[in-house]
Amino acid sequence: VTPAPASPSRRTPGRRPGGPDTRGEIVSAARESFADKGFAATSLRAVARQAGVDAALVHHYFDSKDELFIEAMALPLDPRQVAAAILDGPRAELGRRIVTIFLGVWESDEGRQRMTAMLRSVVTSDEVARLMREGITKMILEPVSQFLDGADAKLRVGLIAGHVIGVALTRYVIELEPIADADLTTLIERIAPAIQQYVDS
Amino acid sequence: VTPAPASPSRRTPGRRPGGPDTRGEIVSAARESFADKGFAATSLRAVARQAGVDAALVHHYFDSKDELFIEAMALPLDPRQVAAAILDGPRAELGRRIVTIFLGVWESDEGRQRMTAMLRSVVTSDEVARLMREGITKMILEPVSQFLDGADAKLRVGLIAGHVIGVALTRYVIELEPIADADLTTLIERIAPAIQQYVDS
């Protein structure tokens, strides 16, 4: 699909000034474009065109492409805030912070529902898998791996992500015992050293 | 549902002597019963009744309830063989064997397709999640945890399962870089120590 070049003066019937659904339509168009073309190749201008609105309206609702991307991923939390919280403290405690913050998101009923829904979409849709791949890379892997030493820092952060996602899957989705019923603090105590090993080595 | 007691001499119209689909119908009835009532509460006799066949026919196709259960889970491999291969060797190398054998299943195109399909079913169906929970517990967690010291051996084996499942999810389903493109040997070298830590501590 190659959309026609937009001109600021051109007004099509589909170009609305911003009704109650406009924000949702922008997010929808963005989700499609991010999934189809990836983050880098998606422009706010193209999203505006796709949604049938003026580019200025996209900027009115979203400060940046990052914000639009986070909204498109429908995450229960802002991954930039998660990354900032993870990095806020000594590196010797990074393993514990990662486990505590990540599992903490799943502990509330709402967080668990939204994370489970996200996991479902990831394994059943290639488009969502791509969105998630780009999102995790850009907002978690890259900032956190810069905090680590070693040539394979990104691989290690990826393995950390794999570990905590897998624990969440067994605890909250498969509900495997005794992980599902384990006290959260006990679980954190157990997992933190394995994560810390990836941080240190 | 409380089925009427079966009598060997009673023949109902639905009770077939064993046609081409009989085996599949037994597996289907078994899957339903395992998901609904769990492994322990499912009897081969009740499965036979549910499938509308004689109990002797179930025994003709399946040596044991374990065999029927494995078939019902539609796994790409026999978990008892996996557990046996994992346990065959020194405990100091257990971490490496677990990662090597588990990721090995995903490496072939067919294995990957079947494991991905299984993962999809697990996250989208509570019934399959329950089947998998019972299957992992009975055929992996229990035998492997007996091989470990410590009171929380089962929890640690569960965390090991969580770790390797999560790595498979990031590598083969989300295709997160650089895990997705990493050389398998490099990956095993990286993950084995984290798994071994759960084995040892």
Image (cartoon, coloured by chain):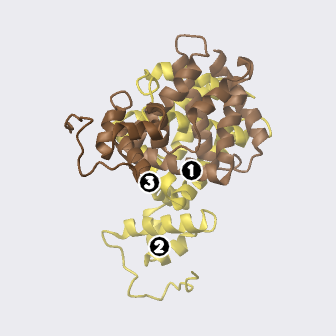
Chain colours: A brown, B yellow
Q: Chain of mark 3?
A: B
Q: Is residue B50 above or below residue A93?
A: below
Q: Measured along the vertical axis of the image, is residue A117 above or below residue B151?
A: below
**Label 2: few (<14), some (14–19) or many (≥20) C-alpha neighbours in 10 Å:** few
Identify which residue, A48 or B91, lies in the foreground. Answer: A48
Residue A109 at x, y = what percent? 66, 54
Quick one: B151 or A152, which is closer to the camera?
Answer: A152
Residue bearing the label numbered 2 = B56
Give yes or no for contact between labels 1 and 2 (Cβ–Cβ under 8 Å). no
- Report, in whole angstroms, how far the alpha carbon at label 1 lies from the one at label 2: 47 Å
Q: Element under label 3? A: loop
* Residue marked by disc 3: B74
Foreground mark, 2 or 3? 3
Q: Earlier in the sequence, mark 2 or mark 3?
A: 2
Q: Would residue A124 be found to the left or right of residue A166 on screen?
A: left
Q: For the residue marked with disc 2, what is the amino acid?
A: Ala
Q: Tell me what residue is drawn at x 60 percent, y 11 percent.
A: A149
Mark 1 residue element: helix
Q: Nearer the viewer, residue A52 or B20?
A: A52
State the separation of the CA atoms marked 2 and 3.
23 Å
Q: Quadrant of residue B116?
A: top left
Task: Look at the image and tell me in which quarter the N terminus of chain A lies.
Answer: top left
Q: Which residue is mark 1?
A: A114
Label 3: few (<14), some or many (≥20) within 10 Å?
Answer: some
Look at discs 1 and 2 and give the one toward the viewer: 1
Residue A187's spot in the image, x, y percent? 74, 39
What kind of residue is marked 3? Ala
